[in-house]
């Protein structure tokens, strides 16, 4: 049974929170408007703060719940790492939505929180520090991804987890390649802390 967990996690991760929320709230398909990314930020661009919050929560839970279930059923680090990878890859390449998935930041956070709350907190702290210092959400995500293998090595020792963190970091950085190009070109949108 435990060896089916990565497949089940992939299928669960393939449920696109952004698309589901957009349909429930009668919003345009986020894959066809704005940045084209089915994620919370793009739902926010469509003018729905509540929808963005629901999408963010759904994306975190897609990583969190499968790994928590796996921890109940198995203590094998390989099974846990594969389950985490399944949920993350499902979000990036969802079978139910023509493999058009998000960038993986929130689902990755859910995965890490389930594996090690302290690691999850460290990653959130890294994201916040970079975001507040440079005011770029995408840069914060990429910097956090780049540091995640080191933080994983320190806070969640074990080869399966280290390999997982490397795979997730590479995929997340690849999904942010357009953001990286815009950063170098000076065209990336900065975060704003102003109240509206």
Image: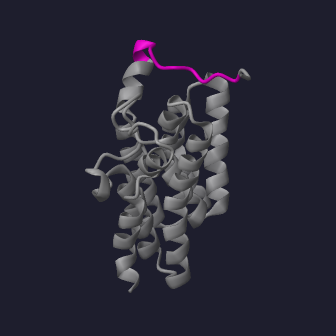
Q: Nearer the viewer, residue 103 or 20?
A: 20
Colour scheme of this structure image? Answer: one colour
State yes or no: residue 195 in magenta: no
Relative to 5, does residue 137 appear above or below in the rendering? Answer: above
Q: Residue at x 37, y 22 (%)?
A: 181
| 126 relative position to 81: left or right | right
**Residue 153 percent across, percent down from the top left:** 54, 57
Q: Nearer the viewer, residue 17 or 156?
A: 17
**Residue 116 percent across, percent down from the top left:** 61, 64
State yes or no: residue 188 in magenta: yes
**Residue 25 percent across, percent down from the top left:** 51, 44
Relative to 94, does residue 68 appear above or below in the rendering? Answer: below
Relative to 87, does residue 138 appear above or below in the rendering? Answer: above
| Residue furthest to the right | 195
| Residue furthest to the front | 26
Q: From the image, which quarter does the N terminus lie in?
A: bottom left
Q: Quadrant of residue 128?
A: top right
| Residue furthest to the top | 186
Q: From the image, which quarter does the C terminus lie in?
A: top right
| 164 relative position to 106: left or right | left
**Residue 106 percent across, percent down from the top left:** 53, 48
Magenta-drawn segment:
184-193
| Magenta part, dominant SS | loop
How many discs appear? 0
Q: Residue at x 47, y 19 (%)?
A: 188
Q: Nearer the viewer, residue 72 or 76?
A: 72
Q: Quadrant of residue 72?
A: bottom right
Q: Nearer the viewer, residue 138 or 193?
A: 193
| Residue furthest to the bottom | 1
Q: Residue at x 49, y 69 (%)?
A: 66
């Amino acid at each position: 049974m435990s060896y089916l967990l990565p497949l089940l996690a992939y299928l669960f991760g393939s449920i696109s929170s952004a698309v589901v929320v957009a349909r429930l709230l009668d919003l345009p398909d986020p894959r066809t408007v704005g940045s084209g990314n089915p994620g919370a930020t793009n739902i926010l661009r469509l003018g729905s703060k509540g929808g963005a919050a629901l999408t963010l929560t759904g994306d975190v839970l897609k990583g969190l719940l499968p790994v928590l279930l796996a921890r109940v059923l198995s203590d094998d680090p390989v099974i846990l790492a594969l389950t985490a990878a399944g949920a993350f890859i499902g979000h990036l390449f969802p079978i139910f939505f023509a493999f058009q998935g998000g960038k993986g930041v929130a689902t990755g956070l859910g995965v890490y929180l389930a594996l090690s709350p302290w690691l999850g907190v460290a990653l959130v702290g890294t994201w916040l520090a970079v975001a507040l210092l440079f005011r770029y959400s995408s840069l914060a995500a990429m910097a956090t991804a780049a540091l995640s293998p080191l933080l994983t090595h320190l806070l969640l020792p074990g080869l399966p987890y280290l390999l997982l963190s490397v795979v997730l970091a590479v995929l997340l950085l690849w999904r942010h390649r357009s953001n990286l190009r815009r950063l170098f070109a000076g065209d990336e949108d900065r975060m704003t802390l102003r109240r509206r």
